[in-house]
Image (cartoon, coloured by chain):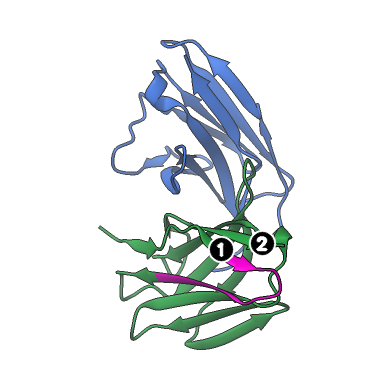
Chain colours: A blue, B green
């Protein structure tokens, strides 16, 4: 399975600021995914990021709030912009190893907005 | 809206017992199903995948799939305190790529 390095692991941020989360994969992958896990809840897909194209966002998530970069096949960033306390969550990146063999997650970023 | 349902728990079982975790899904065309384990403060890790009706065994874990009933389950035999975690059921809606819908998770507590 792919190994994903995600950072920062946690951060406490002031409302109105932005935080960029980075994920580095140890192998080339076509698709990378960004999820949010709000406290006590399951995972919700934010967007899918393919190298060389704009990310595809799920309903309820917009590019202005969660801009994503995917400059190459091993790296992606998610920015949480103009943060409010409602953005306090765990953010996870993931990659598919091969189709229909599940997904591997990074270690997550625990974000608290105060 | 594609949905995946699980009992939120907590499900408490004594050490050595069988833990049974259940999941139902709404999308009939789904072909691949997964169970993830998530320890508190950690990211989910894949423990089982199943694609065909019937049972699939891997060590102490058995996944069961019944597509007609849109039901998938996970049995954990000889439960250990280290199995205490939240178990997430996930359904891939895309047969050629990845479009996961996760259930809310069932919190399992194995009592020593």
Residue at x-position 64% and y-position 50%: B39
What percent of the width, then of the height, locates residue A80?
46, 24
Residue B52 visible? The answer is: yes
Compute the Cα span from label 2 to label 1. 7 Å
Please tell me which of labels 2 and 1 falls first in the chain. 1
Toward the viewer: B6 or A63? B6
Which secondary structure, mark 1? strand
- Tell me, for residue A41, which label it has, or none: none
Apparent side of residue B11 relative to residue A105 in the rendered image (left or right): left
What percent of the width, then of the height, locates residue A12?
56, 17
Q: Are marks 2 and 1 in contact (CB under 8 Å)?
A: yes
Main SS, magenta region, reads strand
Q: In the rendered view, would you say B48 is above or below A73?
A: below
Name the quadrant containing residue B67: bottom left
Apparent side of residue A14 relative to residue B93 in the rendered image (left or right): right
- Tell me, for residue B12, which label it has, or none: 1
Residue at x-position 40% and y-position 15%: A82
Q: What stretch is highlighted in magenta?
A: B12-23
Residue A99 visible? The answer is: no
What percent of the width, then of the height, locates residue A63?
36, 29
Quarter of the figure with the N terminus of chain A: bottom right
């Amino acid at each position: 399975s792919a190994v994903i390095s995600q950072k920062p692991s946690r951060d406490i941020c002031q409302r109105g600021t932005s935080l960029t989360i980075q994920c580095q994969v140890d192998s080339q992958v076509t698709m990378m995914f960004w999820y949010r896990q709000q406290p006590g809840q399951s995972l919700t897909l934010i967007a899918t990021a393919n190298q060389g194209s704009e990310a595809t966002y799920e309903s309820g998530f917009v590019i202005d709030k969660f801009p994503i970069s995917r400059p190459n096949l091993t790296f992606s960033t998610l920015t949480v912009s103009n943060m409010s306390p409602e953005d306090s969550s765990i953010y996870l990146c993931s990659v598919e190893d091969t189709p229909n063999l599940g997904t591997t997650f990074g270690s997550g970023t625990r974000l608290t907005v105060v | 809206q594609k949905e995946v349902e699980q009992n939120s728990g907590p499900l408490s079982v004594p050490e050595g017992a069988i833990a049974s975790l259940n999941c139902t899904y709404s999308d009939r065309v789904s072909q691949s199903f997964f169970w993830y384990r998530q320890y508190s403060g950690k990211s989910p890790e894949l423990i089982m995948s199943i694609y065909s009706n019937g049972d699939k065994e891997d060590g102490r874990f058995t996944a069961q799939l019944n597509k007609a009933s849109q039901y998938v389950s996970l049995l954990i035999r000889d439960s250990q305190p280290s199995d205490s975690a939240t178990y997430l059921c996930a359904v891939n809606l895309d047969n050629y790529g990845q479009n996961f819908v996760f259930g809310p998770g069932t919190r399992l507590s194995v009592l020593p």
